[in-house]
Image (spheres, helix red, strand yellow):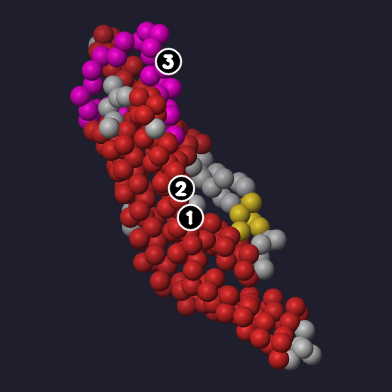
């Protein structure tokens, strides 16, 4: 029994390192409102189920084992960071709209990172979280980290992929895709507010007695909220497209690490 435990324990610690690092950066599970005890507990049980479902080979605990632990931690952080990048699309789109509506100077606390975030970006983030939970997206994240060992086993070549530049190329491409998606998500509101600016400019030229600076900000806020309310039913479709990009990016990341 002791010999079997000593054979499985090194592999279990490696799996635990990747899964714990994944929960540190992945959306939903990494939110500050989630208790630390829950994060540790779910990481332990997910690692346990993963080890029991995979063909564990003896892993020697020698000097290279420390580098192996670091490698698994980096893989977990990278997978969670890719999912986090896609989720930040909602906040970036909200910041684009906030600057047009005049809310750029008013920020609220982001529940996931504790940093300051735009008002509408935070609202879109909460809507995205609720939609993500409604379609069982958190279950897909758990399945993704458990099935990642089919693509990237414990004896992977992660450092070789970093040296080849495939990982950095993928991250840059994902970052550019994130900004494109954020602009597409905020394009209707930005277009409507731009038309309001054009109308105010024409009003200022034709009727100089109107104080555009006084009526401009309330009018843009009113139009922004009306367009926002009209767009809310369409957010479900937009978020589903966003989450499909999220799962596709995770799959592409695993393929990149597999080589």
**Disc nearer the start of the sequence (2/3):** 3
Give the quadrant of residue 253.
top left
- Please say if the residues under marks 1 and 3 sit with CB atoms less than 8 Å apart: no
Looking at the image, the residue that sits furthest to the left is 55
The mark found on residue 66 in the picture is 3
Using the numbered discs, state the Cα–Cα distance from disc 2 to disc 3 in whole angstroms: 31 Å
Crowding near the residue tagged with mark 1, few <14, some 14–19, many ≥20 C-alpha atoms within 10 Å = some
Quadrant assignment for the N terminus: top left
- Please state which of residues 1 and 237 is positioned toward the viewer in this rendering: 237
User: Where are the magenta residues, as a range?
Assistant: 48-77
Report the residue at 25% width, 14% height from top.
Answer: 58
Instruction: Describe the element under mark 1 as helix, strand or loop.
Output: helix
Report the residue at 61% width, 62% height from top.
Answer: 119
Report the residue at 31% width, 43% height from top.
Answer: 252
- Please state which of residues 119 and 138 is positioned toward the viewer in this rendering: 119
Crowding near the residue tagged with mark 2, few <14, some 14–19, many ≥20 C-alpha atoms within 10 Å = some
According to the picture, the residue beneath numbered tag 1 turns out to be 179
Is residue 58 inside the magenta stretch? yes
Give the quadrant of residue 171.
top left
**Taking 80 as reference, is 227 left or right?**
right
Using the numbered discs, state the Cα–Cα distance from disc 1 to disc 2 in whole angstroms: 7 Å
According to the picture, the residue beneath numbered tag 2 turns out to be 175
């Amino acid at each position: 029994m002791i010999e079997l435990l000593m054979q499985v324990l090194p592999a279990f610690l490696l799996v635990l390192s990747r899964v714990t690092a994944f929960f540190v950066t992945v959306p939903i599970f990494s939110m500050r409102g989630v208790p630390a005890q829950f994060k540790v507990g779910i990481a332990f049980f997910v690692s346990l189920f993963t080890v029991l479902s995979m063909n564990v080979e003896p892993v020697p605990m020698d000097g290279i084992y420390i580098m192996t632990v670091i490698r698994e931690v980096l893989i977990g952080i990278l997978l969670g960071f890719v999912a986090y990048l896609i989720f930040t699309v909602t906040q970036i789109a909200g910041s684009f709209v906030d600057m047009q509506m005049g809310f750029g100077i008013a920020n609220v606390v982001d529940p996931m990172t504790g940093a300051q975030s735009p008002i509408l970006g935070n609202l879109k983030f909460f809507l995205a979280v609720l939609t993500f939970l409604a379609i069982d997206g958190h279950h897909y994240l758990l399945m993704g980290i458990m099935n990642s060992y089919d693509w990237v086993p414990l004896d992977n070549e992660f450092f070789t992929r970093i040296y080849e530049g495939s990982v950095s190329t993928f991250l840059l491409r994902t970052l550019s895709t994130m900004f494109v998606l954020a602009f597409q998500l905020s394009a209707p509101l930005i277009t409507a507010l731009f038309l309001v600016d054009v109308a105010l400019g024409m009003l200022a030229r034709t009727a100089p007695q109107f104080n555009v600076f006084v009526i401009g900000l309330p009018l843009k806020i009113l139009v922004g909220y009306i367009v926002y309310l009209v767009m809310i039913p369409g957010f479900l479709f937009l978020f589903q497209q966003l989450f499909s990009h999220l799962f596709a990016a995770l799959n592409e990341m695993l393929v990149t690490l597999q080589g």
